[in-house]
Structures are given as structure tokens and as C-alpha cells.
Image (cartoon, rainbow, N blue to C red):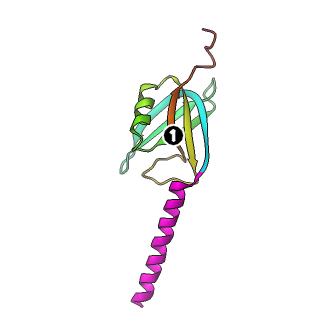
Amino acid sequence: MKKVLFYILGVLAVLYLLYFAFITFVPYSEGTRTGELIKFSRKGVIAKTWEGEISQGISGAQIFQFSVLGSDKEVIKQLQENEGNYVKLTYIERYATFYFWGDSKYFIKKVEEAQSPHFRDR
């Protein structure tokens, strides 16, 4: 009886590790988004995560929500410095997320300053 229980627990542990490895190393998509950085904050009760939003439209109708892993210190610093400005974000979309990574499936890997499309002629 104990042997069967250990086999079942072992199989469940291996399945969880395979799922974790799949989510970590296999991206669903990669791309860029450009918009005005309107929110960037650290939130959470048990696990603090970095969450943000960019507005991709004039009225704010198109909001792109994203997360940043806590280990990406340079990305966090660049986002904090550019709040309220136009930025170009390079992201990786994952199939799923874990509560300690963030709320969104979109994870920012690179931040570049961008020019606003509304004020190009000025």
C-alpha cells in the first residue's frame, strides 16, 4: 500500500515539474507593443509582483496589461523612469502564469523609449 502511494506521489511530482518546465521555457508568442506607460506598481500580499499597463489608444480604450519578473532589475528600473512616457515594450507571452510571477501572461523583456504618434510634428 505504501509503495503504491509513493509511486502516485512520485508521478504527480514529475508531472508538476514537467508542467513548470513547459510554462517556463516554452513561450506562446513574442512581440512588441508601443504605448503610453500609465501604470507600473508592485502589488500582492504573499508574493509581490510587478504589474503595469500601457495605453495604446487616444481614449485609453486599448489597455495592454503586463508583468515583469522580479529578477529583471534593469527592466523594472527603466519602467519606473519612463512612467507617463511613450515606450516600446518587447514581451514574451506564456501559456499560463504562476501567482509568484504575476497576474498577466505577458512578461516584459526589454524597454525602449518611443516617440508619441500624437505629437510627431512638434
The secondary structure that dominates the magenta segment is helix
Q: x, y percentage for residue 94?
A: 56, 50
Give the residue at x 64% y 10%. 121
Vertical relation: 16 (above or below) 119: below
Q: Kindly identify the amino acid type of the residue bearing the numbered disc 1.
A: Ile
Q: Confirm whether the magenta stretch covers residue 92.
A: no
| Location of mark 1 (residue) | 108
Judge left or right: residue 13 versus residue 92: left
Q: Residue furthest left?
A: 46
Q: x, y percentage for residue 85?
A: 51, 22
Q: x, y percentage for residue 34?
A: 59, 29
> Which segment did they paint magenta?
1-27
Count all numbered tags in the image, as a single digit: 1
Res 1 quadrant in image: bottom left
Secondary structure under the numbered disc 1 in the rendered image: strand
Residue 115 versus residue 63: which sits nearer the camera? 115
Q: Residues within 10 Å of mark 1 (few under 14, many from 20)?
A: many
